[in-house]
């Protein structure tokens, strides 16, 4: 085992105990600490030299009587303030005002998936213009996929209309201007303005519970957008927890480690990728998909669904579908060909979410059914529609001759990201 | 590095300690330099990462509360002070018996898993077993063993952190090591 101190130290070293810091905790604690420091920096009220004041006041008998009354009044006022301070309920309006008046916010946002995986995102926002999200994907056992830190960092500067995505593990970066982003790109995260809007609803008390050993007071806030829960420290009013429901029933976005008004350095929002990062922007052009690309996406989706087209073109489900596709059937032999297929599918997804006109009607249609229309679309400036059938054949059809639209078209969702 | 540069370096870091009393930037800088060390110390004393992160948070929030009254002048003083606060926070955390029990149970659980996966390797020293053995030492011995063998602090610094004589630190460490050896021999022998 060990006979000396040196041998023991060596044995300890060989244990390789994982004590590496979690960057999310490190950053969140840093912000909390500095915010607490800033709060504590407010100038303290100078202490009255009570003895001296008392001596002056009590110099005459008449003044002494008046002073006694003042002292009694002040004492009772202090008692009232102290007592009410203990029992005052935190009004929701005060909580909302704190968010409204804060110039910065940072918080940790957690979203768990049915698969057991979790996305934990540290969100930092400065005013309405700057947003930084550090997304860490966690395995079902709670450990991050990459020990080195976040899976992706997204920085958005609304003033210049640009966004940079950094991928620390591969040290790659992609810078894009909003013109290149689809209309619903805002869904990548909850912006500070979005959060403030969610807080502007009708509130009702939810009672109290313990959060991290603190007594928390809750408010249910219902706005036209959502019904959320807001939990604050019952003693100080500091926000502790927000629960925001997602479109999927029972799945919530949990917001914790909230810091309002903390110092956020401008360098956190720099759109310039670090020097050792490879900028993929130059190599990656989305562009519009060709008809072949659209057919490829539909084909692979049907293949992954046992040769049946899906209920909806829901990108969140595509990774699961893709795992079931026998890619060899598509004749892919080289890495280059695989990359071309991946790019074609990405291009088509991009296009689908970019506000173009298209209709999907393929639910339950079997691959090869030549009489059943699956998908039709028309590009800007075109008169006729391109209709793709179950056998992946295409016909150009005039608007008046289009197949009947499905009664209710299932919603098309972007792939899950930071929010 | 020249002696002059070393002196300048030391001067700068000491200046940081002075400035941290009133400048958030300087305090942030000190935090960046010492966060990993404090967390590591907490992981080694508390085994469970979540507990270690909670205590690390408490330590730095305490630093904010007390930094204006911190009497030290050098970064070394600050480091000693930080380890002392960390030790106190760990003690406060472990004061609740339920917490202590939970940490030991976690170590036992983890130990069983490791035993299950390395059954062929014989009774080698592993972290859960060592943690359980250290937890049986006195509070002061635990601190000394962790600071010395895990954080590799010199005895002079350990003595300063615990405000004890240098010779006391050395003797206590030596005794603790002897106890550990006996306990580990017993538990690994059983395994």
Image: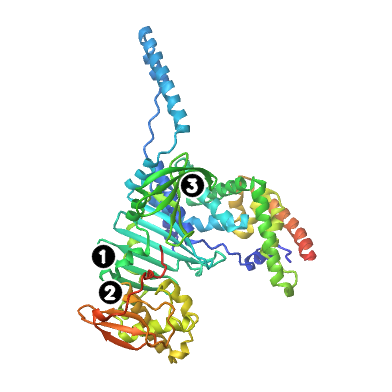
| Residue toward you, A17 or A133 | A133
For mark 2, does the 10 Å Cα neighbourhood hold few (<14), some (14 to 19), or many (20 or more) residues?
few
* A67 in relation to A159, above or below: above
Q: Which circle, 1 or 3, is nearer the viewer?
A: 1
Residue A114 in sight here = yes
CB-based contact (under 8 Å), mark 2 and mark 1 = no
Horizontally, residue A201 falls left or right of residue B65, namely left
Mark 1 chain: A
Mark 3 chain: B
Q: Locate residue A419, reporting x and y percent.
A: 40, 62
| Residue toward you, A238 or A376 | A376
Tell me the residue that label 3 is attached to.
Answer: B61
Horizontally, residue A55 falls left or right of residue B141, namely left
Report the residue that reaches farthest toward the top.
A61
Q: Locate residue A119, reporting x and y percent.
A: 47, 64
Q: Which circle, 3 or 2, is nearer the viewer?
A: 2
Q: Residue at x 48, y 60 (%)?
A: A251
| Residue toward you, A103 or A378 | A378
Tell me the residue that label 1 is attached to.
Answer: A161
Which scheme is used to colour this image of the protein?
rainbow
Element type where label 3 sits in the image: helix
Residue A287 in sight here = no
* A132 in relation to A176, above or below: above
* B32 in relation to B117, above or below: above
Tell me the residue that label 2 is attached to.
Answer: A356
**2 and 1 marks on the same chain:** yes
> Which tag, 2 or 1, sits closer to the chain's start?
1
- The span from disc 1 to disc 3 (Cα, nearest Å) is 37 Å
Q: Residue at x 43, y 92 (%)?
A: A331
- The span from disc 2 to disc 1 (Cα, nearest Å) is 22 Å
Q: Locate residue A217, reporting x and y percent.
A: 47, 42
CB-based contact (under 8 Å), mark 1 and mark 3 = no
């Amino acid at each position: 085992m060990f006979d000396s101190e040196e041998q023991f130290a060596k044995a300890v070293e060989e244990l390789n105990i994982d004590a590496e810091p979690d960057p999310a905790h490190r950053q969140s604690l840093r912000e909390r600490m500095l915010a607490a420091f800033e709060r504590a920096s407010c100038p303290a009220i100078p202490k009255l030299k009570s003895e001296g004041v008392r001596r002056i006041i009590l110099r005459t008998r008449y003044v002494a009587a008046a002073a006694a009354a003042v002292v009694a009044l002040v004492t009772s006022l202090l008692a009232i303030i102290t007592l009410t301070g203990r029992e005052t309920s935190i009004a929701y309006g005060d909580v909302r005002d704190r968010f409204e008046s804060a110039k910065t916010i940072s918080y940790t946002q957690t979203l768990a998936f049915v698969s057991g995986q979790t996305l934990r995102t540290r969100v930092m926002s400065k005013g309405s213009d700057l947003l930084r999200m550090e997304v860490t994907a966690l395995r079902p056992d709670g450990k991050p996929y990459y020990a080195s830190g976040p899976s992706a960092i997204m920085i958005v500067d609304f003033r210049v209309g640009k966004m940079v995505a950094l991928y620390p593990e591969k040290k790659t970066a992609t810078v894009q201007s909003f013109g290149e982003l689809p209309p619903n790109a805002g869904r990548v995260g909850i912006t500070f303005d979005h959060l403030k809007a969610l807080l502007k609803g009708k509130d009702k008390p939810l009672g109290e519970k313990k959060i991290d050993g603190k007594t928390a007071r809750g408010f249910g806030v219902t706005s036209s957008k959502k019904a959320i829960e807001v939990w604050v420290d019952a003693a100080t009013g500091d926000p502790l927890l927000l629960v925001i429901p997602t479109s999927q029933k029972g799945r919530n976005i949990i917001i914790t480690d909230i810091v309002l008004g903390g110092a956020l350095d401008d360098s956190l929002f720099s759109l310039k990728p670090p020097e050792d990062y490879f900028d993929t922007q130059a190599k990656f052009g989305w562009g519009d998909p060709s008809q072949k690309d659209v057919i490829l996406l539909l084909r692979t989706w049907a293949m992954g669904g046992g040769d049946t087209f899906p209920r909806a073109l829901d990108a969140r489900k595509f990774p699961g579908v893709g795992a079931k596709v026998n890619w060899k059937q598509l004749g892919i032999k080289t890495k280059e060909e695989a990359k071309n297929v991946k790019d074609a599918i990405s291009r088509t997804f991009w296009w689908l979410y970019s506000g173009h006109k298209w209709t999907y009607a393929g639910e339950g249609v079997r691959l090869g059914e030549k009489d059943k229309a699956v998908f039709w679309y028309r590009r800007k400036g075109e008169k006729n529609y391109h209709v793709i059938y179950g056998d992946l054949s295409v016909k150009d059809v005039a608007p008046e001759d289009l197949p009947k639209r499905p009664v209710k078209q299932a919603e098309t969702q972007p792939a899950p990201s930071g929010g | 590095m020249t002696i002059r540069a070393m002196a300048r370096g030391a001067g700068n870091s000491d200046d940081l300690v002075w400035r941290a009393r009133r400048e958030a930037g300087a305090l942030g800088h000190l935090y960046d330099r010492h966060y990993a060390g404090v967390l590591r110390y907490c992981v080694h004393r508390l085994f469970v990462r979540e507990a270690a992160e909670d205590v690390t948070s408490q330590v730095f929030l305490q630093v904010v509360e007390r930094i204006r009254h911190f009497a030290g002048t050098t970064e070394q003083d600050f480091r000693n002070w930080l380890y002392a606060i960390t030790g106190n926070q760990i003690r406060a955390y472990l004061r609740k018996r339920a917490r202590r029990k939970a940490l030991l149970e976690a170590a036992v659980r983890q130990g069983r898993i490791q035993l299950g996966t390395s059954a062929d390797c014989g009774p080698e020293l592993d972290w859960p077993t060592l943690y359980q053995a250290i937890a049986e030492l006195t509070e002061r011995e635990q601190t000394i063993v962790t600071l010395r063998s895990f954080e590799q602090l010199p005895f002079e610094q350990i003595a300063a952190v615990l405000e004890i004589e240098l010779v006391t630190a050395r003797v206590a460490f030596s005794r603790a090591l002897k106890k550990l050896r006996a306990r580990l021999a017993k538990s690994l022998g059983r395994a």
